[in-house]
Amino acid sequence: MVTLKEIQAASTSEIQQLANNPLIAQNLKDVFPHPYALANAEEFLALAKQGVLGHVFGIFVDDTFIGVCRVVPQGDIYRNNAEIGYWIGQPYWGKGYATATVNLLTAFAFNELKVLRIFAGVFGSNKASMRVLEKAGYTLEAVLKSAIVKNGVVLDEYLYRVFNPDLQKTWV
């Protein structure tokens, strides 16, 4: 069973071991380094503890750490929105853990943060993440053509979203 725990429940070595994978880094923003050293995990945990990265969680199956996810509430005119992001360690791919994680993140954002809309941007080359979001009830809202550059390659960004069914009636 997938659970989300405070990120400090994962050790720096657990994070580093799973994160140090080019197949994970290729689908994340450039702020996520590759190679991923122990010092990167230490810096990441320090930033998460300070609250700089939004609400950051370790993803666990029973007591095994399998990845990281977060919800980032937006501000100003976007204050009714939150962005989600996640990565799962390669040994745990294809087992439904990412979809379960997105469902848990979505419930947290709707129930605890009371946002109206949650969104996630996906690299055009990351079809697996698109399927995860669709299975979790997210809808493709837009394709931002040639919006990102990763490893020297220009890619489209697919923007997925879901609305809070409890709040949508009050805002529309």
Image (cartoon, helix red, strand yellow):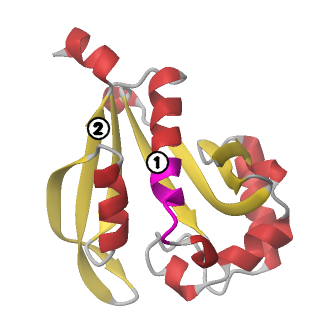
**In the rendered structure, which segment of residues is drawn in magenta?**
94-102
- Residue located farthest toward the bottom when viewing the structure as drawn: 152
Determine which quarter of the picture holds residue 6.
Answer: top right
Q: Is residue 87 visible?
A: yes
- Image coordinates for residue 17, horizontal then vertical, percent: 75, 78
Who's the residue at 50% across and 22% down the image?
111
Frontmost residue, 108 versus 103: 103
Q: Residue 59 — which label? A: none
Q: Quadrant of the C terminus?
A: top left
Q: Residue 53 in magenta? A: no
- Image coordinates for residue 131, horizontal then vertical, percent: 31, 62
Q: What amino acid is found at the position of numbered circle 1 in the picture?
A: Val
Frontmost residue, 12 versus 61: 61
Label 2–label 1 contact, CB within 8 A: no
Frontmost residue, 84 versus 43: 84
Who's the residue at 21% across and 12% down the image?
169
Q: Quickly name the residue at label 1.
A: 102
Who's the residue at 42% across and 44% down the image?
83
Q: Mark 1 Cα within 10 Å, few/some/many (few <14, many 20+)? A: many
Does residue 43 appear to the left or right of 122 in the view shown?
Answer: right
Does residue 87 appear to the left or right of 117 in the view shown?
Answer: right
Identify the main secondary structure in magenta.
helix
Rendered view: 89 above or below 150: above
Element carrying mark 1: helix
Who's the residue at 28% across and 45% down the image?
138
Q: What amino acid is found at the position of numbered circle 2 in the picture?
A: Val
Q: Residue 97 in magenta? A: yes
Q: Quickly name the residue at label 2.
A: 162
- Image coordinates for residue 149, horizontal then vertical, percent: 32, 79
Element carrying mark 2: strand
Rendered view: 17 above or below 11: below
Q: CA distance from mark 2 to mark 1?
A: 11 Å
